[in-house]
Image (cartoon, rainbow, N blue to C red):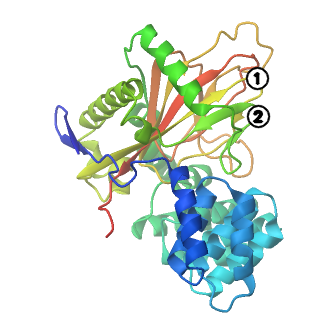
Amino acid sequence: MREGLTSGARVRWEDGELELRPRERFLPLLRAGVEAAPDRPEPRRRLARLLLQTEQLEELEELATPALDDPGADPEVLHCLGLGALATERPELALRALRRAVDLGFTHSLGALANVLRDLGRDDEALTAALQALELDPSNHSASGVVARILLERGERERLWSLCQEIRRGGGWGAYLPSAMAVCARTGEQHREVERLVGREAWFLRRDLGLAPEFSRRLAEELLDLMGTGDLPRRKASTGTGRRIDQLQVVARTNPVVAELFAALRAAIEEYLAEREDALADELLGQQLGGRLPDELSLGAWALAMRGDGHEEWHMHPSGWLSGVYYVEVPDMTASAAEHPGAIDFGPFPFTGVEEVPSWPPWRIAPRTGEMLLFPSSYAHRTWPTGVDEDRIVVAFDVLAAHPAEA
């Protein structure tokens, strides 16, 4: 546990005591557990989760496919199988697995099931599943995204606005909801409400962290060494040429260079919160967290090195509260022939294509080495390829409300 003092609030950082090692190191233990006790559900469930998280999707399919015809199957294993099948573009398998998980009582699968039905062109069924998911959990981001897309395509903007308000009254916020409100807002009062909730001037921060150029060079070397030569993950927004390493919060425990970056990020986040302390009670961030600064925050981070055609598609971070990016190294792109080389765009999520949204106009930034961007996790964003054969190295992170460890 670490404490940081801000001008108006004390922020306590929870360091994730249960995640002392990278997730991949647990795989051999879980495989051995499943082999030793094939009838015990917990080792199989934990292995399925970890195979999904680490994108061992072929092994996941081998492990979980027998559950499709097992009357006593673990529905969470089927849920993992469905998400893995989505990542490998096998919607029929995903549909079968997720529907079976729902039938077995795992209602958490409803949002993903709605997405599969939507991809298969079965919009009526998708909308029914998504609305059922939101009734059970107003914060189900997969379901809210499906509902927004379908209702916008059908021109049912008033219905979508009313549904967004209903979800907010039920305690749901973040993810696709602000974008849905922005896109379907029509009256002056609705536009003003959206501006109050997502306004760039209130909630977006661009700041140089003031770290020495020599530090950025050392950090870049460390991160490239840690990434190795692996490909980009299939279940993320990243596409093109690049590499990634997850769980930097674990790396920071033993790597002093990464730890120094984390200290600077925490200090900047604390300052951001202190400057907005009065607004947190009833605005975007405070609403998402029940109207108060949480007792503890956690910081999860990952790093990306992308070059050439590597970029991020439109996405957001639905599990986060605040999100951000630190630009470790931005290459010289003056000779690039790419459009908007290396830039990052922000704005509402483009459910049916980019359109003019008066209450939330998009903006574009050409970042610089040493700069940090900090914003609500519900801000949709994308990046543009650099078009050059040198790495753009970034550390992306999510700030989350820490939860008590489960027994």
Badge 2: few (under 14), some or many (20 or more) residues near its Cα, within 10 Å? some
Compared to 197, does 91 lie above or below?
A: below
Residue 174: % across, % down: 47, 54
Residue occupied by mark 1 = 308
**Which quarter of the image is occupied by the C terminus?**
bottom left
Q: Would you say 331 lies left or right of 338 here?
A: left
Location of residue 334 by image quarter: top right
- Please state which of residues 60 and 311 is positioned toward the viewer in this rendering: 60
Spatial CA span between label 1 and label 2? 8 Å
Please, what is the three-letter code of the amino acid marked with disc 1?
Gly
Q: Residue at x 69, y 59 (%)?
A: 149
Q: Earlier in the sequence, mark 1 or mark 2?
A: 2
Q: Residue at x 28, y 37 (%)?
A: 273
- What's the mark number on residue 270? none
Compared to 82, does 363 lie above or below?
A: above
Badge 1: few (under 14), some or many (20 or more) residues near its Cα, within 10 Å? many
The total number of labels drawn is 2
Are circles 1 and 2 on residues that touch, CB within 8 Å?
A: yes
Location of residue 359 by image quarter: top right
Q: Residue at x 71, y 23 (%)?
A: 307
Residue 45: % across, % down: 55, 72
Please, what is the three-letter code of the amino acid marked with disc 2?
Gly
Residue occupied by mark 2 = 240
Q: Would you say 111 lies left or right of 84 here?
A: left
Residue 229: % across, % down: 69, 32
